[in-house]
Every structure is written in structure tokens, then in C-alpha cells.
Image (cartoon, helix red, strand yellow):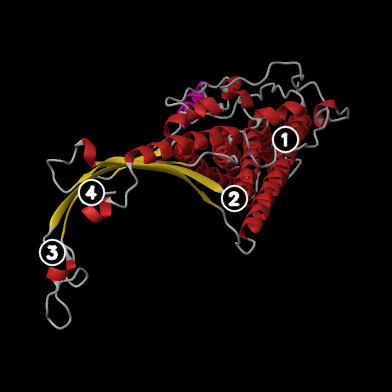
């Protein structure tokens, strides 16, 4: 609103006392109406959907021939997994690697940024609770059109003398302050804020899930490398043993005891094993490069010292199935997404109701800079407005149907996540139980294969059997030894994956509260968010 009124325009303005009386009546009435309707809110009340939760895990309670004393599972009454769950493996090298995940892993950094963006969205939506205040100062120089106000006509004559208007230019000085506010009568803003808060909490849980996944992958790759080192050690020893066998066969061949066929067989076996030994370097390098990626380092600058696998799986406390819903960050994220989708239903339903806007404007306007800020140059206006959609061809109804369907989708996703979590826990419990028995059986097989090789070697040296029997015995022993290393690798990986399936050391109590999300400085428990 700007100054520069003519005398004719001044007569059209209502006198000051009348305007004040109208404002003092309209403004309190609007505020009273907003207070009365502020408690109104549309949309369904959120309740967490039920999920089928078994009373106990199947595997730890199963009594069958595969259960042995070699694998002692922790009982539900034992303490839960600590925050730094990898420390249960008692490996200093693994501990050092895991500590780098929060610092350097780029997936974790990306998830943290997404969470901060979700927090900012909450603050954006909360700003709608408050009025919007703007100022738009202006200095405008203008001149009216002569054609419009009795100036030069189409025939070229002037009628300005009859018009009563002066065609001189003038400058208008204006300093308006405008305020507008939409009271949240139907809960549109509240539901929007709640939806964004729940989404931010889901983002915090997603961050924990990304962190847990990265930590588990570090442990998996670490034990994969250690298993490769174990196989390398085994094949190095086997190559040395095969070299000794070849030397013995060549001596016997020169002495006329062994045949050239036996020498060729020994050479073939040695060279084949050497090739397999060399080939192990490919997988080790790939696992090392994958580990560097998880740690946020270039593969060219990262290396891990060689150390054969020599570890036993820790005892993992698994608690009761119902607690899994509170310990898995992906389940917590799914539950928060349901709450967010439920709040969006209220936002969509609020569109059926009218929007009421309270607006006011005040300031100074004049055609003279000298009189710009004088009291007679003041102007103001205040009043409410209402807007209601009378016909939208089913747009609002379709929008509500859409958000309800999206809510049903989040419910299905949540229940699927819960079922997947139980499946993963049971898979790894079963794997650990069966692997424990299988490793015992494999160790017994190695003992038998070792004895068989000794007998075959003695009979060959005595000239009773051919060298082929020695080769078969050596191959059988190596196959069983490789299987034993692989089984112990699977056992360690299953332990890591069981801890991951149980949610690591996280629980839903570490999720930031709505108050924390809206705070200027977010205070988060350790091991939750950066």
C-alpha cells in the first residue's frame, strides 16, 4: 500500500474512529474463533498395527542330535549385546577397523546428511504455526497517461484544461508492513509437523541401520580375509609337503624303485596345488579392496597384515522374540514410517475444510519525503478471509484414498520387515548349531585322512602300493582341511550375521525424541548419530 492520494481519493476513505472501531471488533472476534477451533483436528489416531510374534525362538529350544557341547548359546536372561558389539570377538585389529566406520564410511555420512535434512524439514513445517510478517518499502516516481486523464486525444487536441488533473509526475514513498496468519483449525499443520517428526525419527533409525550394515560388512570382510590367509597357510604347507614327496619320488626313480609315471604324477600334483595357492591372492585382494571401501579409503592405500583365521565365535545373547521389535533399527524405521503415513491422512482430510486467513497491513505512505513518517501519512487495514473449494472433480477424495493406500503399504512393509528379521535370526541360529556339529565331524575326518596318508606313504616306501595311492590320500587330506577352514569361516560369519540380525547393540530407546529433533542442538546418545 503506498501513499500519494489526491483530494478526491481522500473523501472515499472511512474516517479514522470508524476504522478503529471496526478493527477492534474484527480482530478479537477472529482470535476468539481461532481459540475455539484450535483444538479441532481431523485424521485417524495412530495405533501401531499388530504383528505376529512367536513366544520363543525355534532353534535354541530344539532338542535334536545335532546339538553338542561345542556350541553354547547364551540364554534369554543373559545381558543384551553391548553398543560396540564387535568387541565380543576379542580382536584388536577388528576393533580398530570398526572404529573407522563412523568417521569415514560414506554411506553412513550420506544417511547422516539425510537425517539432518529431515530434521530441517520439521523446523520448516513448524514455522507454519506462526504469522508471516513482511515489509516492502518502495519509492516510486510516476506520471499519469495523458490519454487516460484528459491529455492528448486521438485528434491531437488537448483537453487537460477540462479534466481537472495535472499531468505532472509525482513520487510516492511507501513503507508497508504486512502480516498474515492461517490458524491451524483442522490440524493440517499439526499433522504435517507430526508426519515430518516421525519421518525424521525413521531417518535416525535408517542411519543406525546403515551404520550396523557397514559394521557387519567390515566384520564379514575381515573374517573372509582371515579365512583366505588360513587357506594360504594350509596350501603353503601342502606345497612344501608335496615338494618333499616329489623329491622322494625322484630319488626312488633314480634308484630304480619308482617309475617315471610316479614322478610325473607327483609333479602334476605339486604344480596344481601351487596354482591353487597362487589363485588365493585374487580373492584376498578383492576382500581387502572391499574393506577399504567400507572404511572410506582408496583401495590403493589400504592393506591388512596376513594373519590366518584363529578365532572362536562368541556367545551371543539373543533375548526373546518380542524384544527384537525394539532392537532392530530397520523395524523401528518401518514403524515410524507408518506413523508418518498415518499423519498424512489427516493432512489430506483437512483439505475438505475452509482455510481462514487473518491478515493485517500498516505503514506510512506519502508523496513527500518530508511527510513520509509523519502521523497523518499512516495507513492500516485488518480483517479475516475465508477460502473453501466448492468443486474439485473428486481431487480431495482421490488424495485421501491415495494417502490411505500409502499407509497400508507402510503397514505391509513393516510386517514384512518383522518377518524377515525373525527369518534372519532363525537362519543364523540354525547355521551356528549345525556348523558346530559339522566342524566336529570334519575334524574327525581330518584325523582319519591324516592316518590314511601315513599308511599310504609307508606302504609306498615299502614298495607294496603304487604312488597313486599316496596322491589320493594327500588329495583327500587337503580337501578335508580346506573344508574345515571354510566351515570355521562360515561359523564366524554366521556369528556376525546373527548379531546384525539381532540389531547389534542398538535399541529403540536411543531414537531421538520429537523434542530432540526440534532442538537447535541435537543431543543424541553415543553410537546413534554423528
Q: Which of the two discs, 2 and 1, labels the residue nearer the N terminus?
A: 1
Q: Is residue 276 left or right of residue 424?
A: left
Seen from the viewer's position, the closer of residues 265 and 332 is 332
Q: Which of the two discs, 1 and 4, labels the residue nearer the N terminus?
A: 4
Q: Quadrant of residue 52?
A: top right
Q: Which residues are magenta?
A: 92-101
Q: Which of the two discs, 3 and 2, labels the residue nearer the N terminus?
A: 3
The residue under label 3 is 167
Return the mark for residue 258.
none
Seen from the viewer's position, the closer of residues 443 and 179 is 179
The residue under label 2 is 351
The residue under label 4 is 3
Q: Which of the two discs, 4 and 3, labels the residue nearer the N terminus?
A: 4
Q: Which of the two discs, 3 and 1, labels the residue nearer the N terminus?
A: 1
- In the rendered image, the quadrant that contains the C terminus is top left
Q: Residues within 10 Å of mark 1 (few under 14, many from 20)?
A: few
Give the number of the mark in front: 2 or 1.
2
Residue at image location 80% in from the left, 29% down from the top = 57
Amino acid at each position: 500500500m503506498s501513499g500519494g492520494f489526491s483530494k478526491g481519493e481522500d473523501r472515499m476513505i472511512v474516517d479514522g474512529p470508524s476504522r478503529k472501531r471496526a478493527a477492534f471488533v474484527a480482530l478479537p472476534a477472529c482470535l476468539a474463533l481461532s481459540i475455539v477451533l484450535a483444538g479441532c483436528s481431523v485424521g485417524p489416531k495412530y495405533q501401531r498395527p499388530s504383528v505376529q510374534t512367536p513366544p520363543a525362538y525355534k532353534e535354541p529350544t530344539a532338542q535334536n542330535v545335532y546339538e553338542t557341547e561345542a556350541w553354547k548359546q547364551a540364554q534369554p536372561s543373559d545381558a543384551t549385546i553391548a553398543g560396540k558389539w564387535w568387541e565380543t570377538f576379542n580382536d584388536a585389529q577388528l576393533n580398530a577397523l570398526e572404529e573407522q566406520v563412523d568417521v569415514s564410511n560414506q554411506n553412513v555420512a550420506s544417511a547422516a546428511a539425510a537425517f539432518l535434512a529431515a530434521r530441517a524439514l520439521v523446523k520448516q513445517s513448524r514455522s507454519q504455526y506462526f504469522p508471516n510478517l513482511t515489509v516492502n518499502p518502495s519509492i516510486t516516481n510516476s506520471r499519469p497517461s495523458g490519454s487516460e486523464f484528459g491529455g492528448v486525444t486521438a485528434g491531437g487536441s488537448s483537453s487537460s484544461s477540462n479534466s481537472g488533473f495535472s499531468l505532472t509526475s509525482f513520487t510516492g514513498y511507501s513503507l508497508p508492513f504486512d502480516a498474515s496468519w492461517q490458524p491451524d483449525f483442522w490440524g493440517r499443520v499439526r499433522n504435517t509437523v507430526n508426519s515430518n517428526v516421525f519421518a525424521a525419527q525413521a531417518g535416525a533409525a535408517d542411519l543406525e541401520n546403515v551404520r550396523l550394515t557397514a559394521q557387519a560388512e567390515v566384520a564379514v570382510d575381515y573374517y573372509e580375509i582371515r579365512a583366505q590367509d588360513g587357506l594360504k597357510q594350509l596350501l603353503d604347507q601342502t606345497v612344501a609337503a608335496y615338494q618333499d614327496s616329489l623329491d622322494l619320488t625322484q630319488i626312488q626313480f633314480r634308484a630304480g624303485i619308482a617309475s617315471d609315471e610316479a614322478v610325473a604324477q607327483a609333479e602334476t600334483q605339486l604344480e596344481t596345488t601351487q596354482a591353487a595357492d597362487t589363485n588365493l591372492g585374487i580373492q584376498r585382494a578383492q576382500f581387502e579392496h572391499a574393506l577399504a571401501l567400507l572404511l572410506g579409503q582408496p583401495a590403493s592405500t589400504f592393506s591388512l597384515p596376513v594373519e590366518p583365521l584363529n578365532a572362536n565365535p562368541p556367545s551371543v545373547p539373543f533375548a526373546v522374540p518380542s524384544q527384537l521389535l525394539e532392537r532392530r533399527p530397520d523395524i523401528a524405521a518401518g514403524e515410524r514410517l507408518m506413523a508418518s503415513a498415518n499423519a498424512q491422512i489427516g493432512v489430506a482430510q483437512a483439505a475438505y475444510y475452509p482455510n481462514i486467513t487473518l491478515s493485517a497491513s500498516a505503514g506510512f505512505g506519502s508523496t513527500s519525503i518530508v511527510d513520509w513518517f509523519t502521523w497523518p501519512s499512516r495507513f492500516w487495514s485488518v480483517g479475516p478471509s475465508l477460502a473453501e473449494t466448492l468443486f474439485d472433480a473428486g481431487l480431495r477424495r482421490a488424495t485421501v484414498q491415495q494417502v490411505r493406500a500409502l499407509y497400508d503399504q507402510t503397514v505391509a512393509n513393516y510386517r514384512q520387515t518383522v518377518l524377515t528379521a525373525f527369518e534372519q535370526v532363525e537362519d543364523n541360529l540354525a547355521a551356528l548349531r549345525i556348523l558346530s556339529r559339522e566342524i566336529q565331524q570334519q575334524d574327525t575326518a581330518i584325523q582319519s585322512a591324516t592316518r590314511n596318508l601315513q599308511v599310504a606313504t609307508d606302504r609306498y616306501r615299502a614298495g607294496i602300493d603304487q604312488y597313486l595311492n599316496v596322491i589320493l590320500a594327500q588329495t583327500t587330506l587337503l580337501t578335508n582341511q580346506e573344508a574345515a577352514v571354510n566351515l570355521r569361516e562360515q561359523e564366524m560369519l554366521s556369528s556376525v550375521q546373527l548379531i546384525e540380525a539381532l540389531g547389534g547393540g542398538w535399541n529403540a530407546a536411543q531414537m531421538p525424541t520429537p523434542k530432540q529433533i526440534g532442538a537447535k542442538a541435537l543431543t543424541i546418545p553415543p553410537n546413534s548419530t554423528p
